[in-house]
Structures are given as structure tokens and as C-alpha cells.
Image (cartoon, helix red, strand yellow):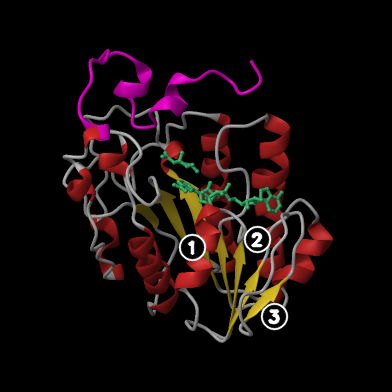
Amino acid sequence: MKRVLITGAAGNLGKVVRVKLKGWVEVLRLSDNAELEPQNAAEEIQCCDLADAEAVMRLVEGCDGIIHLGGVSTENSFDNILNANIIGTYNLYEAARKHGVRRILFASSNHTIGFHQREDMLDADSTMRPDSLYGVSKCYGEMLASLYYDKFAIETARVRIGSCFDKPLDRRMLATWLSADDFVSLIKRVFECDRLGCPVIYGVSANSERWWDNSKVNFLGWQPKDSSDVFKTAAYLQPRASDANDPAVRYQGGGFAGAGHFED
Ligand code: NAI
Ligand code: 15L
């Protein structure tokens, strides 16, 4: 691949991924609705709002693949989610179709399945149980990707990212943590494998606490190398008295499952 587009490049994951993917392809085209500056000659900046269909059509032109990280990334007002995640993702897939892009990585989220209990081991075929309007918007993105695969043969990795931070921020993340290096190795597998299809992939490191089974995507040959286990004894992650029926403790989505609507 010559040119790969990264949306949401000014965000937390975008900032890390652009650096780790330096030299991977000839050109990284970076986009966001926040400001961006090129860091080297192989980066191209083209900022726009994902809700602007014409701008997104121009953004995608000339790209061979897309890493779609852009959008609202936590619970928010329905209007904001509608513009960025619903309309924005549609605009991106339409532009991909019109410009002949064959492969996309869609940053979905564990909040598509956040209302499953923590005792349940899920896999790619588990029922969606979104825990927020944000989670619903990611379910929509996954379904849109499925439509564009079945109808137009555009392949998408629907990556249900767990918690991609430097380290687990709380006890829940001992199960949901994804290291940046493991995310980047997944990105590379997704774009380098001969055949992708439209799989659901749980974006999670090799943590010994697990709620998600990735065996249905063994064909990818992706093997996460990091594990949250090295953080287990950290003082800030030690058990504290908690109510086992608190939705934030009971459900996989944690606080997202426990919270009301953003605007209430
Ligand atoms: P982030 O919020 O830091 O980055 C998202 C970026 O999208 C921001 O820079 C924002 O300016 C941009 N954006 C928002 N609305 C936009 C619009 N209408 N047009 C253009 N750009 C817009 O989020 P983060 O953590 O970097 O996550 C990246 C993606 O991965 C998001 O889609 C998020 O939902 C998903 N994800 C991230 C997880 C994590 O642990 N970081 C976990 C699960 C999913
Ligand atoms: C997400 O989907 C969010 O984008 C991220 O900020 C975290 O909250 C993550 O899920 C999580 O569940 O830890």
C-alpha cells in the first residue's frame, strides 16, 4: 500500500499510532477536526469534519487503506454522536466505495457488548449489548461495515478495542487493556494479510484476566505480546470494598453501563 488514511489522528490513539507506523507505508494521510502538523515528509495533513460529506470525499481520494479512529470516543450528546459517528462513518464508507478503497480498520469498542456480565466469555458471534448511545453508534459502524462488505466487497476489521492506554487505569482494565504495541501489530496484520473479510476482533492484549475469545480470528495470525499482568501488584490496582451488584462492577462496560444518558 502506498497511502493510508488515519482519521482521528489528533486523538490519543492517533498520536501514538502515527509515530509507531512511521515508515510502514509511503504516505500517511492524517485527518481530524482538530489541528494537526506534519512531523515528517511522509505525512500529509488534510483536516475536516467527518460530518462534511464533500470534504470526506476529497479526504479519501488517492488512499489505499483507512484506519478509522475519528469520532466521539466516549458517551456524549446524541447530536454529537450522530454527526461524528453515524453520519461521519457513513460519509467515510461512501467515499471509500466511490474511490475504490478495499480495506478499512474500524475502531469499534467494547461498549458494543458492555451490558454482558463479566462472568460471560464472549466471542465474535456474541449478541451486541451496547451500554451507551456511544456503544450503539459503534454497533451501527460495525453493521455499516458488514453491509459494505456484503454489497461492495470492501473488507473491514471491526476491532472492538478494550482499553488502549499506557497502563490499566483501574481494576476493570486488567481484563480490557490493550497495549499500543499490540494495537499497532494488529493494524499491520489487518492490512498485510491476503484475505481479511469483515471479522469482529477484540482489541485486547494477552491479559490473564479475559472476557473475550479471539479464536474465530486465528486465521489472522495476530498474537498480542503484552499483558496487564505486570501491573497486577501495583498499589493503585489493589482490591477495595465494592458492591458486586453495582452495574459498574457487574458489567463488562464498567462505568458506561452504570451511567445514565449524558444529558440527564
Ligand atoms: P480520542 O477522542 O482521543 O480521539 C478521537 C479523535 O476524533 C479526536 O482527535 C477528535 O478531535 C476526532 N473527532 C471527533 N469528532 C470528529 C469529527 N466530527 N470529525 C473529525 N474528527 C473528529 O479517542 P481515542 O482514545 O484516540 O480513540 C480512537 C478511536 O478508538 C475512537 O473511535 C474510539 O471510539 C475508539 N476506541 C478507543 C478506545 C481506547 O481505549 N482509547 C477503546 C475503544 C474504542
Ligand atoms: C472506549 O470505547 C473509550 O473510547 C475509551 O476512552 C475507554 O473508555 C474504553 O472504551 C474503555 O472501555 O476503557
| Residue beneath the point at 18% across and 47% down | 229
Q: Nearer the viewer, mark 1 or mark 2?
A: 1
Which corner quadrant of the image does residue 55 belong to? bottom right
Nearer to the camera, 9 or 112 = 9
* Disc marking residue 62: 3
Q: Please check the rendered image and state whether residue 137 is part of the magenta-colored stretch, yes or no.
A: no
Question: How far separated are the C-alphas under marks 3 and 2?
Answer: 14 Å
Q: Is residue 90 above or below residue 54?
A: above
Q: Amino acid at mark 3?
A: Gly
Magenta-highlighted residues: 236-264
Nearer to the camera, 100 or 151 = 100
| Residue beneath the point at 52% across and 42% down | 139
The residue where tag 1 is placed is 16
- Could one spot residue 111 in this view of the protein? yes
Q: Amino acid at mark 2?
A: Tyr
Q: Earlier in the sequence, mark 3 or mark 1?
A: 1
Q: Is residue 8 above or below residue 84?
A: below
Which corner quadrant of the image does residue 192 belong to? bottom left
Q: Position of residue 238 (x, y in %)?
A: 20, 30
Q: Please check the rendered image and state whether residue 246 is part of the magenta-colored stretch, yes or no.
A: yes
- In the image, taking residue 86 as reference, residue 159 lies left or right, namely left
* Disc marking residue 93: 2
Q: Amino acid at mark 1?
A: Val
Secondary structure of the residue carrying numbered label 2: helix
